[in-house]
Amino acid sequence: MLAEKLYPALRSREPFSLLTSNELDSWLQEGELREFSIGSILVRPDELPSHIFLVLAGEVRCLVPSAATKDEITLAKIGAGTLVGWSSLLRGESCEHVIASEQVRCLALPAKAYIKLFKNNSEFEAYFSSLVSPQEAYIVALASAQHTAKRVQGWSDDLADRALHAQAQTCRPGEPFEAPTGAPGLEWFLSTAGVPEHAVGQHILSGDSLPSRSGYQLPYRVIGLPPSDRLPASEQVIAVTPLSSVETEPRQLDQLGILEADHLKDNDRFPVVRGRGQLAEAMAVVEMVALEQQVPFRNDAIQKVLEDQFRRDKGMSIELLAGLCELLGLNTQLAEVESRFIASIEAPAIWLWGGIPVVFFGARKNKAILGHPHKGLQRINISDLENQLGDRFRLALPRRVTATPTSRFGWSWFTPLLGKYKGALIMVFVASLLAQLFGIAIPLLIQQIIDKVLSQGNLSSLNVLGSAMVVMALFSGILMALRTYIFIDTTDRMDLTLGSAVIDRLLTLPLAYFEKRPVGELSQRLGELNNIRNFLTGTALISVLNLIFAVTYLVVMLLYSPLLTAVSLSILPLYLLLVFGVAPIYKSLIRKRAIAQARTQSHLIEVLNGIQTVKAQHFELTARWKWQDRYRHFIDEGFKSTALGATSREIGNFLNQLSGLLVLWVGMWLVLEGDFTLGMLIAFRIISSNVTSPLLQLSGLYQGFQGVQLSMERLSDILDQNPELNKADEVGQISLPPIIGNIRFENVSFRFKSKGPYQVNDVSINVPAGSFVGIVGQSGSGKSTLMKLLPRLYDPEQGRIFIDDYDIGKVDLSSLRRQVGIVPQDSLLFEGTIAENISLNDPLASSESIIEAATIACAHDFIMSLGQGYATQLTERGGNLSGGQRQRIAIARTILSNPQLLVMDEATSALDFDTERRLCANLQRWAAARTVFFITHRLSTVKSSDLIVVMHDGRLEELGKHQDLMQKKGRYSVLYRQQAHSE
C-alpha cells in the first residue's frame, strides 16, 4: 500500500528517478513508515545507521560538535523531501546526528538495500558521489583544521560557512585522485574513515593515490572546501539535497508536490490586486500575499516603507518584498531554486519575473498560476516559465507562524452584533418610516393652504388644514422621540457587547504583545472603540436611514416636476467630486493626528508612571518640553484635519444653498409660465430639502467613514492578534493534575525574534520534586526568560518542558498557571489595605493565614510597625512603601496562594543581605515539599540550594551543588569568589 502511494510521486524525482522500476518498487516494498516525536533521534553520531530516512512531514535538526566546546550546535534545519543517513554509509563512519525538532514522519529505507543499489546502478552512484551533506563537510572541515594545528576556538561559524559551500568527489582505492576542473580554488580533504595511513580531514592533492582498505568495497569520498578567505560574501543558500532544492524553509512533502503534483482544485480562487509603477506593483504583490494568507494589510505602513526605500534609490528586490511580508507578521525565508522545481514550490511565493514582482499561487496541469500586478491572474506553461526564469532563480517564501495575526476584524465583524439586535433596529426603522410619511404630508398640506386657502380666502379650510398639520407634526415628533429612545437603548447594549469583546481579547493576548507596545499606545487604541461606536450607532445608521427615505421623497419630486428634480440634483456631481477628492487627503491627516496623539499620550503615561524617577533625577523640565513638543505636533496635525473638514463642510453648505436657489429660480419661472402653482413650488422646495440634505450629508458621512476605517485599523491590532490559546485548542486539553514538582527541560530553545539570537539555547535540566533550585548568572544570561517558559508566558521555539511527566504545552493553560506562583522583580501592589493586597488571590483568607504568609516573607514585623498594621492603606502601586517592603508583601501574597511550584524572579533584589538570607531560609523550610526556583545575583543566598543552575549567554553553563561547582573552578567559582572578595 505504501509503495503504491509513493511510487508515482517519487518516480519523477531524483535520485529515485535514476532507478529502474523494479529497483524502486523493490526498495519501497522494504520501506516502512516511522513516527518520531520531538527530540527523538533519527541518526546517531556514534554508529552507522541501519536505515536512511526520507522525511515526509515535519522538521529535523542536523547537529554537529562545536569547534570551541564539547557542546553540539545546530548546523541546519531541514524538512520534508530530504534524505538523511546516506553520507555516513558512504564514508564508512557516522558523521550525522539528526534529531526531530517537531513531530516527524519518515519513510525508513534499509541501508543494505541502499548500498546494493549504489554498487549496481552507475547513475545512482554518480548522483550520490557528487552530493555532499553539510554535516559530512563540517566534520571534514573541523578535522582538517585540527590536522593543520590551527586554532579552532570560535571557528564554528567559519566551519559552517565552509561546509555549506563544499563539493564532493570520489576516488577508487589504489587509483590517483583527480580534482575536478570545474572547481578551482577548492582544497580537498579525505572524508572516508579507516583508510590506511590516512586520517579523516587529511589534505589530498591531485595525483595522490590512496591505499586499499581491507574489506571496504566503496569508492573513497573526498570533500572540496573553500578556504575561509574565499567564501562567497553574499551567498545565503543552504544546499542540503536536490530533493529540497536549496530552500531554507522546511516543507511538508505534499506541499512540495512529491505526493500530489496537482495540489490545486478547480474551484480555487485567488486574490488579484493590480498596480503600475514600482510602488504600486510592490504594494499589489504584498496585498495579494496578505489576502491569500488572511493577514491584516497595513496599507499606509507598507506604503511609507516603500516610499522611504525608493527615496534612497533602492530599487525592487526580493529582499525588499520579503521584508514587507515580515512587516505583516509572516515568517519569510529567502531561497534559491532550480527552475525545474517550480511545480514543487509551496505557495504562496514571490519572485521577480522580467523585473516585475509576481505572486505564485501554485501549479495545476503543468501550468503555474501567477498573480501579476499588470495582467491580473496568469496561467503560464511551466516549461515556458522555466525558460524565461533561467536555470535558477531567487524567491521569497512567506509563511504563517503561531504569532502571525489573522485578518478577522472588519465590517463583517459587526454583522452578528447587528443581527443580535435586529428586532430593536427594525422598530427604529418602522418608527422612522412612519415619521417620514407624516413628514411628507406636511408639505402637501402647506401646498393646499397656499393654493386653495390663500387664493380663495377660505378660513374654514385653513382651520382644518392647520389642525391636520399640528396633528401630523405631533405624531411625527412622538415617533422620532420613540425612535431615539429605542436607538439609545440599543446602542448602549451594542457598546457594552463591543467593549467586552475588545477587552476580553486584549487580556487573552500573549505577554510578548504587551512588551512590544507602550501602555499609552494601547490606551489610545482602546479609545478608538468610542469612534467606531459613535459612527455605527449614530452617524452611520441615521444617515443610512435618511438616504433610504430620500428615495421616497425623490419619487414624489419626480411626480411634481422632472425638470425641477434635475435642477435640484444638478449640484450632486460637484459634491461627489468634493467628497472623493478630499477623502484621501483627510484620511492621511487624521492618521497623522492619531499617531501624534498616541505618541503624546504614551509619553505622558510614561512620565506619570515614573514620576518618582523624574523628580529624583530632576528632569521635570525636560519631560515637560518633550511633552509640549509632542503635543504641539498633535495640535498642528489636528488643525490641518479640522481645517480641511470645516472647509469641505462649508463648500457642501454652499452647494446646498445653491441647489435651493436654483430650485426657486427655475420654479418661479415655471410659476410665471403657468406650469406650476406657488403652493406646488413651496411644497417641492420643502420635499427637495429632504433629498438633498441626506445626499449632502455624505461629506460628513464619508469623512466619518475614513476616520472609523483608521480606528478599525488601529483596533484590529488587538482583535486580529492570536490569543495565548485559541478556543479550538482548549477543547480536549487535559487539566494538569496537582503538581508534585518534578520538572524537566528537554533541549529547550527560545528567542524573541524568529531570526534573532537565542535567549535560551538548547537547555536541558532535570529537577526532582521538592528541590530548592538557585539560578544564577550575569544580566542577560537568560535566567528570567527560562523561568517565563515554565508558566508558558512564552512558548519555547524548540524542545519541551515537563511537569511530573506532563508536557506543559499539551495541558490546559489555566490549570497550569493556577498551580505556579511567580514573584517578579517589579512587584505591583494595588490601592487598598495591606491585608487586601496579600489576600488578593484569596479574598476569604483568614487573618491567621495572612499573618503566617507575611511572617514567612519577613514582612510581619514591619507591617505591625505601621500606624494601622495590616489595615494600612496603600496608595497606587504601593507608592508609600519602600521597594523592599513591596517585594515582601508580593512574596507573602504568592505564599498565601499556596503554589506547589514557586518561581522567585529576583524578587529579593531590593532587600538587604540579612533580610534576604532570613527570607530564603524561611522559604526553604516552608517549601520543604515544594519545588522552588530562586533567581538571584547574590550567590551566597543560594549556597545551600539543592541544585544551582549557572546560565551564560542563554546556555546552561554549569549545574550542580555549591561544593561541586566550586571544585570545578568554572564560571560559578569565579563569580562566587569575586562576590565574596567584594563583600
Image: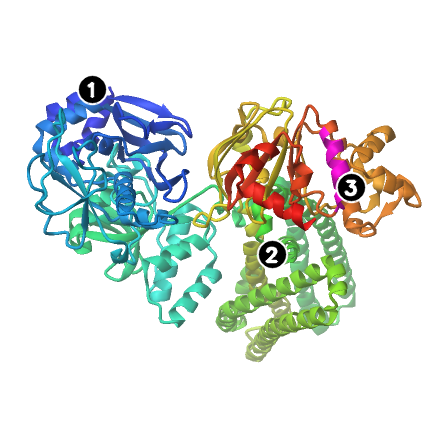
Looking at the rendered structure, the secondary structure element under dot 1 is helix
Q: Are marks 1 and 3 in contact (CB under 8 Å)?
A: no
Which is more foreground, mark 1 or mark 2? 1
Q: Are marks 2 and 3 in contact (CB under 8 Å)?
A: no
Residues in magenta? Answer: 911-924
Which residue is the site of mark 1?
A: 29
Residue 829 visible somewhere in the drawing: no
Does residue 335 show up magenta in the picture? no
Looking at the rendered structure, the secondary structure element under dot 3 is helix
Residue pictured at 27% horizontal, 41% vertical: 143
Q: Are marks 1 and 2 in contact (CB under 8 Å)?
A: no
Label 2 to label 3, Cα distance in Å?
63 Å
Q: Where does residue 331 sit, x and y in percent of width and height?
A: 41, 48
Which residue is the site of mark 2?
A: 540
Local crowd at mark 3 within 10 Å, few (<14), some, or many (≥20)?
some
Residue pictured at 77% horizontal, 49% vertical: 883
Q: Where does residue 27 sit, x and y in percent of width and height?
A: 18, 23
Q: Is residue 838 left or right of residue 294?
A: right
Which residue is the site of mark 3?
A: 915
Magenta region's main secondary structure?
A: helix
- Counting residues from the start of the chain, the first of labels 1 and 2 encountered is 1
Name the residue furthest right: 867
